[in-house]
Amino acid sequence: MRYHPIDIENSVMRCHKKIAECAVFTWTNLLVVVVELDGSESEALDLVALVTSAVLEEHHLVVGVVVVVDPGVVPINSRGEKQRMHLRDGFLADQLDPIYVAYNM
């Protein structure tokens, strides 16, 4: 079965009102979810459990990494499309300046 990023992202967006934006991509067979938190840093840890549960329940997928970042980190082009590969490159180069990163390996 194939999964579309937009379906997973919609599930993540619905799981908490403080999620401003999100994007998903794969990295070495792991599903990575980047979540923009529009709230206090103390809420970052709570988001991890909500995001992983939502993706597991709705798509039967295990999230390998959850990266919580400030709003505006997910790159969007002039047509309003998420630039997931640019985000992946930033993740791999450790350039996202995350609030919190949770690895589920």
Image (cartoon, grey):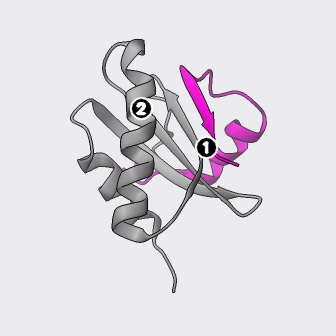
**Residue 76 appears in which quarter of the rendering?**
top left
Q: In the image, what residue occupies the spot 45% across and 22% down?
A: 70
**Residue 71 appears in which quarter of the rendering?**
top left
Q: In the image, what residue occupies the spot 48% across and 75% down?
A: 3
Q: In the image, what residue occupies the spot 24% across and 49% down?
A: 14
Please name the amino acid that badge 2 sits on: Glu
Kindly state the secondary structure of the residue where label 1 is placed: helix
Q: Which residue is mark 1?
A: 87
Left-right relation of 67 to 85: left
Residue 67: in magenta span: no
Residue 86: in magenta span: yes
**Residue 8 appears in which quarter of the rendering?**
bottom left
Compare marks 1 and 2 and give the one earlier in the sequence.
Answer: 2
Which residues lie in the magenta part? 77-105
Counting from the top left corner in percent of width and height, residue 80 is at 36, 50
Q: Nearer the viewer, mark 1 or mark 2?
A: 2
Q: Which residue is mark 2?
A: 36
Q: Outermost residue toward the bottom?
A: 1
- The answer to whether residue 79 of the structure is visible from this angle is no
Counting from the top left corner in percent of width and height, residue 85 is at 64, 53
Please name the amino acid that badge 1 sits on: Leu
Measure the C-alpha gap from mark 1 to mark 2: 12 Å
Residue 2 to residue 86: above or below: below
Name the disc covering residue 18, or none.
Answer: none
